[in-house]
Amino acid sequence: MKNLKPALLLATTIIFILFSRCSDDNVNLTSQVKIRLTDAPAQYDQVNIDIQSIQINSSDNDSIEDGWVEMTLLNPGIYDLLEFNNGMDTLLVDQEMPSGTVSQMRLILGENNSVVIDSISYDLDTPSAQTSGLKFQIHDDFLAGIEYNLWIDFDAANSIVETGNGKYKLKPVIRTFKEANTGSISGIISPAEATPSIHAIMGTDTISTIAEDSGNFLLKGLEEGSYTLSIIPIDGYLSTEIESVEVYIEKVSDVGTIELSEE
């Protein structure tokens, strides 16, 4: 570590702190999640699924009844699964959710589900999909401060069952997989009363946050690379920096306790 002169970032730090004090986006134990829909090819003209709600079950989220978290759909409505095959997908959800172990996901469908065969549309029976939803397993950990892509991969070819008399039922064959996009830096400021702003700097890019009242901080959504960590406290304490903090995808780089000296 080495001491810095706080004057270099003083103006931007003051503005940052003023705005940050009005925000709850500091050391929240959340993960940014983008849920995408994709599909494998199938011998149908269309497979239309009426998606009205997506819920995720987090076993670590005791504040939510039964652990289910309601996600915000960007565009509720009908999706033709066959538009999203051969590497194509569409974004359904882009939001933060409580970090922890995610066990299940479920899709709540509307009533407008259909399959089109030889230009003829047939209603697609979806037992329980309008009530308990289509459930599928995830059983994976989502770390705080990490951004993830989570894919819902329908196998339309094996999910449509002909029941006779021109009737069809959706018996979904679905897999999910995730991909992390970013890493994060965590640590503790001592003494916590120094209430510093913390800046992760790599090249011309800077990501900033402020420490919680406890001294804990989390810089999230960081691209992989080597960062300089600049800590700028309130008057009465010396600024400091830590060089060469390595950030890796889907990893939390813990720098431990950073001791700040009084002026």
Image: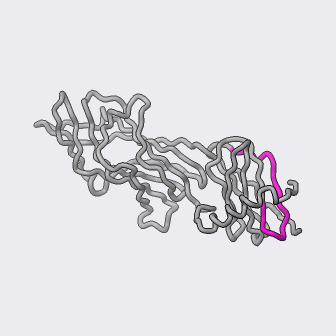
Q: Residue at x 38, y 53 (%)?
A: 54
Q: Quadrant of the N terminus?
A: bottom right
Residue 244 picture location, percent across and down: 79, 45
Q: Quadrant of the C terminus?
A: bottom right
Q: Residue at x 74, y 46 (%)?
A: 227
Q: Is residue 174 above or below residue 199?
A: above
Q: Answer left or right for 14 relative to 8.
A: left
Q: Is residue 25 above or below residue 222?
A: below
Q: Answer left or right for 155 relative to 33.
A: left
Q: How many numbered marks does the figure carry?
A: 0
Q: Could you say which is closer to the camera, residue 168 or residue 14?
A: 14
Q: Main secondary structure of the magenta part?
A: strand
Q: Could you say which is closer to the camera, residue 11 or residue 108?
A: 11
Q: Coloring scheme of the render?
A: one colour
Question: Within the image, what quadrant is residue 84 found in?
Answer: top left
Q: Residue at x 83, y 58 (%)?
A: 240
**What segment carries the magenta color?**
232-247
Q: Residue at x 73, y 48 (%)?
A: 201
Q: Is residue 115 above or below residue 26?
A: above
Question: Within the image, what quadrant is residue 170 found in?
Answer: top left
Residue 214 picture location, percent across and down: 70, 70
Q: Is residue 145 above or below residue 90?
A: below
Residue 31 picture location, percent across and down: 55, 54
The outermost residue toward the left is 165
